[in-house]
Amino acid sequence: MNAHFDCASGVSGDKLLAALIDAGAPLDGAREVLGRLGVGMTLYAEDVVRGGVRSLSTRIEAPADPQRRTWADIEKLIAEAALAEPISRRARAIFSRLADAEGEVHGIPAVDVHFHEVGAVDAIGEIVGVSWALDALGVTRVTASAIAVGHGVAESAHGRLPVPAPATALLLRNAQVTAGLDESELTTPTGAAILAEIVDAFLAFPDMTLRRVGHGAGDRETALPNVVRVFLGDPGEVEVRDGAPDDLAQESVVLLATNIDHLTAEEAAFAAEELRGGGTLDVWMTPVHMKKGRPGLVLEALVTPAKAGTAAAEVVRLTGTLGVRVSPTVRFAAPREVVRVDTPYGQIRVKLAKLGGSLRARAEYEDCARAAREHSVPLRKVAGRAEQEALDARES
């Protein structure tokens, strides 16, 4: 499932959480997850109207808590909440971004940051809630429009600050931003941190088969309806109309990709081999230069749409990467079938494909390698015999 956020009126943690619940993430499930954090928070939700648009508004309340939590305090809360690993990892990554940004603004190490507003209970609940809701909805790719940040000045725990707030501006480095229509703060540090962590690409609107729409309301009226919209849908299919050969079938496929610079060559090769044996259509690796001149690899796998989520999880498990890019695409493929033929070296599987009016054969490597070792003959001799047997059998 793809998710696209419309951020024309800015973003905040409560608006993002409300939009995802309005789009179908179960409210009771969100309450149960937030209850695990052990700080007595309660999640409320109600329908409201913002600028004539019906939306869901959420708020999180908890008993009075004067504690000013550090990053270490928050990480401990999340770790002790017994969350599913993807949810815990995403929530901790979002808070890590907040700690880094606040530390840079104030000139102190991230570990020493006291979070003030963003360490408050409601912000903790919003970040954990959004992390859970994305998982509950089965979202594998997130895109967003340009983010309206506002302009002017805003009040904070540090006094009056320019808009966007310094931490918000740092968090949105490399994101697409716009001023928006209001002389006020439209995007909060919490909202900026969430999008900075979860968004794979910024674009006006992705191609998708739209399934659901959710509206998350802010707590005041703004020039545009103060609403974050989330669109959930299946990846859009590419349709090619330039007259491909009749014997090539157009198939929808998904390309998975991740950058790797932390594995040895042997470990990367093992991961690729395991993926090949796990139902992928193809797997390959390309050497690249990564940041600070480090050599690395881009591992890519081609899979059917039905196996994209499972295969992406396998890529993470096998490589330890922190993210997998998911791109829907198409391929033209010749009709093919796998046959088994008897040869002097045993039974060999051969892939037959028809293209351009001719039949082509390709013997399976593993079968040929096994037979070549057993009979002490060259690999090409086994493959050539198997391919010829398959072609002769089909012609007869």
Image (tube, helix red, strand yellow):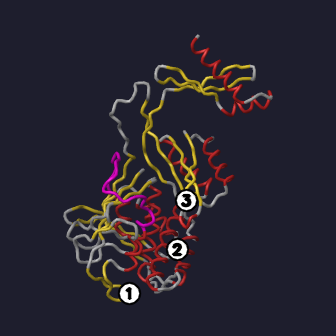
Find numbered disc 1 in the image and state the secondary structure of the residue it sits on: loop
* Mark drawn on residue 180: none
Q: Nearer the viewer's eye, disc 1 or disc 3?
A: 3
Q: Residue 157 carries which label?
A: 1
The residue nearer to you, when weighing 289 against 35, is 289
- Residue designated by label 3: 289
Which of label 1 and label 2 is nearer to you?
1
Residue 11 % position (x, y): 33, 68
| Disc 3: CA contacts within 10 A as few (<14), some (14-19) or many (>=20) | few
Does 209 appear in magenta? yes
Specify the segment rendered in magenta: 194-213
Q: Which of the two discs, 1 and 3, labels the residue nearer the N terminus?
A: 1
Which amino acid is tagged 3?
A: His
* 39 lies left or right of 224: right
Of all residues, the one furthest to the bottom in this rendering is 159
Give the residue displayed 20% in from the left and 66% down from the top: 51
Mark 1–mark 2 CB contact (< 8 Å): no
Query: Helix, strand or loop at disc 3?
Result: strand
Q: What residue type is labelled 2?
A: Gly
Residue 374, position as x, y percentages in the image: 80, 29
- The amino acid beneath tag 1 is Ala
CA separation, marks 2 and 3? Answer: 45 Å
- Place of residue 278 in the rendered image (x, y in percent of width and height, measured from the top left): 61, 42
